[in-house]
Image: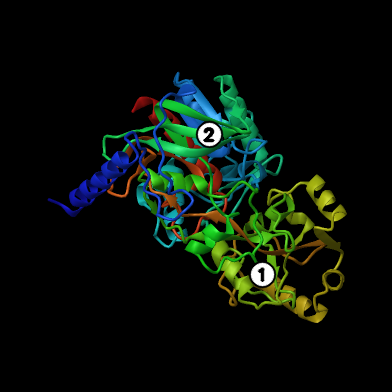
């Protein structure tokens, strides 16, 4: 008998003993003894509501899943614990990586070549090859179709350019016209509503019901709390978990990555607390790579805010943006991936906050910027504007002579077509910093994204600790681990969520 069979048999025996101890009818609960989740729970004797598909979370992944399951004819409910829909997705920076789009912007702008295979290889390399290849390939292969879906079916609008973000080898990052993720959440909400699904707000999932750990034992439904009322919802076909990550749960993130203390700000909404991970584990779900938690290097330094202006440093490297320390010196290759940039900032020392991004007016439109965002950023003090580099240095309290020297060297590197300091690739699309007006924006790392999460297969089925799919349980979006490896390349979040959400919604009905 294999070790897996022995372990499963031992667990089933333990569950049976627990069921007898409470008089029968006990629900599966594999939570660690002594934790808040480790209560003995009895299976519901009756159900308050019955649905075909229950989707947990109303961000990109949840909306996409609900839209697809409802389109396939399933009676679908979309649960959201917060008082408004969208989670992190609605405040996302609105950047979407796809190798092509219906307008073929990359080709028309002569920005080089790209392909799903090139995107796939970038995902693998960007995550230090910790990605599960079949999951990463789903993202690369499905991203262009997902983008077309939200544009054609949901009415999402894009700015007429593509950028090359850190860690990507091609210009493939698209910018939402509105400059934020709401562009896509609204599109997805409209698609879902066409099929009769609206987010059910203020409904918190407080448990996932499953009878036992037998590989044929399905998830039965969920317990929810609406105000003071506790209800049990039955799922005839599937429960789809799309609840996001746990970046706002300091204790949880520190249990996996102790360096990410409360000293770090967080870009996430307040509901990104990770309890669904724990409930899924209690019914046998496996997790992986939970220590891989990403910092966003360009957040507002004092609050951790990820606003429209905080996306400019991310979108700028492919067009020549410059990153400098408060001493006026470069500290990293601007085309490096997020984790490299973030820790290059942190390694400057405890008094290094903030660092700065510097760009020119000529770069704004090509890198996906908009005049109204610039004006708003100037009014709110997010952007600093000057006609000359010495004036910019004075306004940013950066040593003028050092910054002038750094900029002059950077200009020469652009002319020479090579960067001897940091080996950044110089492309024809990049602008020189020779001519102003100049802009600067302060930045500092904040906790941003959880690469680790629930283990799934390519059908988005959640895998149990013995390596088998848990019947009727699916997951999509940031709650899933293994897609991005040790580091997610910026602008891969939206396509990942939508591609996996659509896959989960379809398979939940078909399986």
| Residue under label 1 | 415
Give the left or right position of residue 205, taking residue 268 as reference: left
> Which residue is outermost to the left?
1
From the image, which quarter does the C terminus lie in? top left
Dot 2 corresponds to which residue? 224
Q: Is 323 situated above or below 57?
A: below
In the foreground, 177 or 338:
338
Q: Nearer the viewer, residue 431 or 5?
A: 5
- Which residue is located at x 52 percent, y 37 percent? 205
Please rate how many residues cluster around mark 1, counting C-alpha atoms within 10 Å: few if below 14, some from 14 to 19, many from 20.
Answer: few
Q: Nearer the viewer, mark 1 or mark 2?
A: 2
Spatial CA distance of label 1 from label 2 is 61 Å
**Residue 506: horizontal and vertical position, in percent?**
42, 29
User: In the rendered image of this protein, does residue 354 appear above or below residue 275?
Assistant: below
Q: Quadrant of residue 159?
A: top right
Q: Quadrant of residue 338?
A: bottom right
Is disc 2 surrounded by few (<14), some (14 to 19) or many (20+) residues within 10 Å? Answer: many
**Image spot of residue 244 (x, y percent):** 53, 45
Q: Judge whether residue 418 can be spotted in this image.
A: no
Q: Position of residue 69 (x, y in %)?
A: 46, 26
Which one is nearer the viewer's eye here, 33 or 162?
33
Q: Observer-nearest residue: 105 or 131?
A: 131
């Amino acid at each position: 008998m294999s070790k897996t069979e022995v372990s499963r048999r031992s667990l089933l025996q333990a569950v049976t003993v627990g069921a007898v101890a409470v008089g029968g009818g006990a629900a599966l609960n594999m939570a660690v003894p002594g934790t808040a989740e480790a209560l003995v729970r009895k299976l519901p004797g009756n159900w308050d509501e019955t649905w075909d598909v229950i989707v947990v979370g109303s961000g990109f992944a949840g909306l996409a899943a609900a839209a697809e399951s409802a389109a396939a004819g399933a009676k679908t409910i979309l649960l959201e614990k917060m008082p408004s829909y969208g989670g992190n997705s609605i405040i996302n920076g609105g950047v979407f990586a796809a190798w092509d789009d219906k307008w073929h912007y990359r080709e028309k702008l002569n920005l080089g070549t790209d392909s799903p295979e090139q995107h796939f290889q970038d995902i693998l390399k960007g995550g230090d090859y910790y990605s599960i290849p079949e999951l990463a390939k789903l993202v690369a292969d499905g991203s262009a179709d997902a983008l077309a879906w939200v544009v054609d079916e949901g009415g999402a609008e894009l700015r007429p350019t593509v950028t090359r973000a850190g860690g990507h080898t091609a210009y493939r990052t698209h910018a939402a016209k509105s400059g934020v993720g709401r562009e896509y959440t609204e599109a997805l909400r409209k698609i879902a509503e066409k099929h009769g699904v609206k987010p059910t707000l203020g409904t918190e999932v407080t448990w996932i019901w499953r009878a036992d750990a037998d590989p044929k034992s399905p998830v039965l439904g969920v317990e929810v709390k609406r105000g003071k009322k506790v209800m049990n919802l039955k799922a005839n076909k599937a429960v789809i978990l799309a609840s996001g990550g746990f970046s706002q749960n300091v204790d949880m993130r520190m249990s996996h990555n102790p360096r990410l203390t409360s000293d770090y700000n967080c870009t996430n909404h307040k509901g990104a607390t990770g309890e669904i991970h724990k409930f899924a584990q209690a019914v046998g779900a496996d997790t992986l790579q939970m220590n891989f938690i990403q910092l966003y290097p360009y957040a507002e330094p004092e609050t951790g805010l990820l606003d429209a202006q905080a996306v400019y440093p991310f979108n700028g490297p492919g067009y020549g943006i410059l990153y400098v320390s408060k001493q006026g010196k470069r500290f990293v290759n601007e085309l490096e991936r997020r984790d490299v940039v973030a820790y290059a900032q942190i390694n400057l020392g405890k008094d290094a906050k903030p660092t700065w991004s510097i760009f020119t007016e000529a770069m704004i439109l090509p890198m996906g910027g908009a005049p109204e965002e610039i004006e708003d950023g100037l009014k709110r003090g997010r952007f600093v504007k000057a006609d000359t580099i010495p004036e910019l240095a004075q306004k940013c309290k950066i040593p003028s002579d050092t910054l002038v020297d750094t900029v002059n060297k950077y200009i020469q590197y652009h002319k020479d077509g090579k960067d001897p300091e940091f080996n950044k690739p110089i492309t024809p699309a990049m602008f020189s910093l020779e001519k102003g007006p100049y802009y600067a924006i302060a930045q500092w790392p904040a906790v941003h994204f959880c690469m680790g999460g629930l283990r799934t297969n390519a059908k988005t089925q959640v895998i149990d600790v013995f390596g088998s799919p848990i019947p009727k349980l699916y997951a999509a979006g940031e709650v899933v681990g293994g897609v991005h490896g040790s580091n997610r390349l910026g602008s891969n979040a939206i396509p990942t969520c939508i591609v996996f959400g659509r896959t989960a919604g379809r398979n939940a009905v078909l399986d």
